[in-house]
Image (cartoon, grey):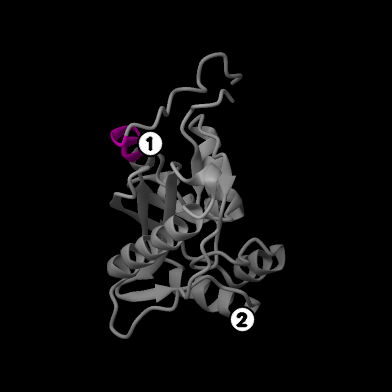
Amino acid sequence: MTTGHPKLVLASGSPRRLALLGQAGITPDFLQPSEIDEKPMRFEMPRSLAKRLARTKAEVAIRIARRSAEKADAYIIAADTVVAVGRRVLPKVETQEAAGIALRMLSGRSHRVYTAVCVVNPRDHIRLRLVETRVRFKRLSAAEIHAYLSSGEWRGKAGGYAIQGIAGSFVVKIVGSYTNVVGLPLYETVALLAGEGYPVTRDWIGGAV
């Protein structure tokens, strides 16, 4: 990369978000996960939770990045994804029992996936966009739930599933952005970056498909 090109920080350790940016032809210069408390506040709605957590991650990323000379003028992307059934937030699951509860709740019904994306420009101005996608699962049999739990794909995933994996076969219908469900809505993220002056097409020329 030629010196003088704007730098980009991805304030996430998610391999899915990194891969999605790569799909859009964008490669962050730095990975800088923002470690925050993601527990919902009492009576907090899913939409509000996603926006609050994304903004908090962005603010943490700003404080850390600006201490470094090489990140002093960098753009920053921060995001948070929330899966919800009605008003109930389904958190990232870390145990097989929690994943089973989530899958049985999602079985045969619709749920919503919210991702809030924050883009920070070199002047530390934060722009936020919330994206909502509705997903309907087929009715899952006990055998399917057991087999999926055995796969381990649920681990660390909001709602206990990853749509880009085996669970993609559970989806009857999706209304809205697919990449939002994976973890980063590409259209909105690229539009935010471009709107703030980041050269999103810089690395497209000569790129391999």
Nearest the camera: 203 or 154? 203
Q: Nearer the viewer, residue 85 or 185?
A: 185
SS assignment at label 1: helix
Which residue sits at x=61%, y=53%?
166
Q: Is residue 7 shown above or below 146?
A: above
Task: Answer whether residue 185 is visible to the viewer in this image.
Answer: yes
| Residue 98 spot, x, y in % from top left | 57, 79
Q: Is residue 193 left or right of residue 29?
A: left
Q: Is residue 111 a member of the stretch shown in magenta? A: no
Q: Quadrant of the C terminus?
A: top right
Q: Tag 2, which secondary structure? A: helix
Q: CA distance from mark 2 to mark 1?
A: 37 Å
Badge 1 amino acid:
Val
- Residue at label 2? 97
Chief SS of the magenta region: helix
Q: Is residue 135 above or below residue 204?
A: below
In the depicted structure, whether residue 40 falls above or below residue 108: below
Question: Which x, y percent locates residue 88?
Answer: 35, 77
Q: Which mark is residue 190?
A: 1
Identify the residue shown where x is 38% and y is 36%. 190
Magenta stretch encompasses residue 193? yes
Residue 95: image location, x then y, percent: 63, 77
Q: Residue furthest right?
A: 150
Q: Which residues are magenta?
A: 190-196
